[in-house]
Image: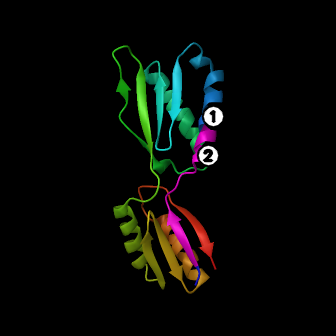
Amino acid sequence: MPSFDIASDVDMAEVKNAVLMTRREVQNRYDFKGVTWDIEESPTQLVLSAADEVKLRALDQALMSKLAKRELPLKNFEHKKMDLSSMGRARQEIAIRQGFETDIAKKVVKQIKGLGIKVQAQLQDKQVRVTGKSRNDLQAVIAAVKEFDIPVGVTFSNFRD
């Protein structure tokens, strides 16, 4: 039986490439000459720091544009509250969400079952597996899921015939 998986994953290699491209761009920008700034990356978050709030916002905007150009789902990057120190330095954490949270996955399964298409949707780890007899039904589910209002980005993978 044909099947595919719906997941909410971020390709960390692409994130690393976007961070490197952002670093190159910011190093060459005139408005960042002589300004101390940094981008720290880990598997679960990115930490931006700059000399002041305006520079931090410019750094964030440059990073988000690079992430978007690499077609990464921006919904999976959750901005935390900006921290301003007494010295004027600004710092912001950006959490990277990997996989569906259980309540979001249950909502996706419920919406797929509510479509009335002859497919089965089930939760597996942090993804949703959809199986059906017809390839056309699966393609209809993919089109419908793209229209759903889901608070994270979705990716479709492991299409098996």
> Residue placed at 51% from the left, 32% from the top?
40
| Residue for badge 1 | 20
Extent of the magenta region: 3-18
Label 2 and label 1: CA atoms lie apart by: 10 Å
Give the x, y percent position of residue 22: 61, 32
Q: Is residue 83 left or right of residue 17?
A: left
Residue 101's image quarter?
bottom left
Q: Secondary structure at mark 1?
A: helix
In the depicted structure, whether residue 113 falls above or below residue 39? below
> Residue placed at 45% from the left, 50% from the top?
97
Q: Which mark is residue 14?
A: 2
In the depicted structure, whether residue 18 falls above or below residue 156? above
Q: Amino acid at mark 2?
A: Glu
**What colour scheme has been applied to the protein in the rendered image?**
rainbow
In the depicted structure, whether residue 153 falls above or below residue 96? below
Whether residue 66 is in magenta: the answer is no
Q: Which mark is residue 153?
A: none
